[in-house]
Amino acid sequence: MRIPFLSKSKSPPLTDLTRESTMAERENEKRGITLDESRVPWVTWRSALLGAFVSIGGVIFGYDTGQISGFLEMKNFKHRFAQLKPDGTYHFNNVRSGLIVSMLSIGTLIGALLAGPLTDRIGRKWSIFFWCIILHVGLIIQISSPAGKWYQFMMGRFVTGFGVGACSLLVPMYQGEIAPRHIRGAMVCSYQLFVTLGIFIAYCINFGTEHLDSTASWRIPLGITFLWGLVLGIGILLFPESPRFDYRHGRVDRARRTMSKLYGIPENHRVIVHEIAEIQEQLDAEKGARGGLRGWFEMFQAPRMLYRIVLGVTLQALQQLTGANYFFYYGTVIFNGAGIDNTYVTQMILGGVNFGTTFGGLYVIEHFGRRKSLIAGGIWMFICFMVFASVGHFSLDVNTPRNTPGAGKAMVVFACLFITGFAMTWGPMVWAIVAELYPSRYRARAMAMATASNWLWNFLIGFFTPFITGDIDFAYGYVFAGCLFFAVIIVYFFVIEGKDKTLEEMDMMYIMRVPPWKSSKWKPPEPENRLTTDQLMDRKVAKKYNKEEERSASKKVSEGVPGHTHAETADDAGTGPSSHFS
């Protein structure tokens, strides 16, 4: 079904399919089957609904991340879990607050690693359902924490992290595999949009409950998390499985129907036929893939996989090292310098800017591509951080910010400008790049490692920032500025442009060593000249098998066993199996 107001608009260019007829298309031509050549709508109501609904996983991520900073300032929460000072007040020291905040990140790291192998067994949608149950278990542990048992609350966040981390892996993976190619980047980026929405909602709810003197001040925001988990966990069962997962498990017709509905075109359309043929090629080559621990070793030995794994891990680490969370951490101080006393108002301002500007990222990624957007965004954030750190370190009175209102206001402006750049580029786009970086054979495992990297650095920054800023105050910003400069270099030299490319074509580009700075103009070769990870791995396995056969045959010949000289001669003549794979 097509959205009516888009019916006359010109669809964005897809990969040129007219010059890359696949073997499946040629077979259809021989059989007299006519391929549909109608226009592909830019978006259908089904794909829009799916992208928006599944992104609720991002709301869970953002909501859980955003609410904890507000809890630490609530009177009742302090009274139950903080340390009692000699003056009769309650206060969290750096270690206890760091553990309560950051244990979620340790849980998410483990959850992301565990979710990869599980989703290859039971599917993407059922994995999301399962981890939503684990999420609720962690919430129950937190809500039931009695007074003084701060470590129970901490462990509840640890268990909750399993569900949050698993969903942070599974949702972008599911979106990347099910989305039509020309809106895949925008659909995966919608995950980050909903992360920022979750943060903003958490800030607003905290603002509405912080005046309560009872446990309701923090238990109400925490209990609302149940709603997000229930909506995602039950609702995902109403949506189709990833067509690539269905196809790999023999449900070909269902995969084709899913793609047809999401693209808004008939099942015999050229785009569907082409993409199904590519998935089949991947599946044929994937049959030799190993499972278990041997599968992990094979992944690192596969062509260009170590390169891509390191790249994915680096990009996710750099997303944290851009310093976005640092701005939220120091928001109270700099907004006090601008005359805002209520810390919850501070959070709402930063959260609102973060959420509102992320909408621009959905437009940017599909109209300017991944590389240009990340490079421009990195330079923009680098400039903002240099100004922010310089003003904060040399001009702001950190102890009494109200003494330097001009410096405080300047820092507020550049904090918002930084968040605008992050929300439109590095915030959403890293998730999109990682979702399309790996072949289906290793996607779950490799994405798990990249996502775990994000959560590891999330933990490190969240735990150590209070100690570092206590020593060097705003000069800490120069560290993030240096990381941004490094990030721009990484993107230019190593990240390949994925705009309007299928996942199989992305794999091909890395295998064929397409220079990243030339990747935006790359066109796929003819089918007979294509290479994928799975094809190369199968050839590698075949060559190894043939070498073992040759060694066995040579050994028997040397021992005088008849009947094997003919096979060896045939191989030498180029007619044996090994020549087929050479």
Image (cartoon, rainbow, N blue to C red):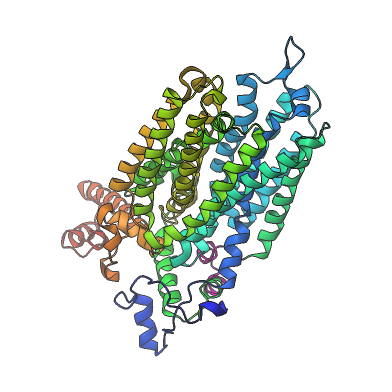
Image coordinates of residue 334 in percent, x first then y, are 54, 31
- Residue interval drawn in magenta: 240-257
Q: Is residue 457 magenta?
A: no
The answer to whether 342 is drawn above or below residue 509 in the figure is: above
Residue at image location 45% in from the left, 20% down from the top: 472
Q: Quadrant of residue 521?
A: bottom left
Is residue 245 located in the magenta-colored stretch of the structure? Answer: yes
Tell me residue 397's x, y (percent): 50, 22
Q: Work out whether residue 9 can be spotted.
A: yes
Q: Which quadrant of the figure contains the C terminus?
A: bottom left
In this picture, residue 115 sits left or right of residue 271: right
- Say if 24 sits above or below 291 in the image: below
Image quadrant where residue 156 sits: top right
Residue closest to the eye, 141 or 405: 405
Residue at 71% across / 40% down in the picture?
Answer: 207
Instruction: Return the residue found at the far top.
Output: 86
The image quadrant where one finds the N terminus is: bottom right
Q: Residue 173 appears at what percent x and percent y?
A: 52, 54
* In the foreground, 282 or 444: 444
Residue 569 is left or right of residue 341, and the answer is: left
State the predominant SS element of the stretch in magenta.
helix
Location of residue 450 with respect to 228 vertically, above or below: above
Query: Can you give x and y, in whole percent of width and height, for residue 450 in the image?
Result: 46, 43
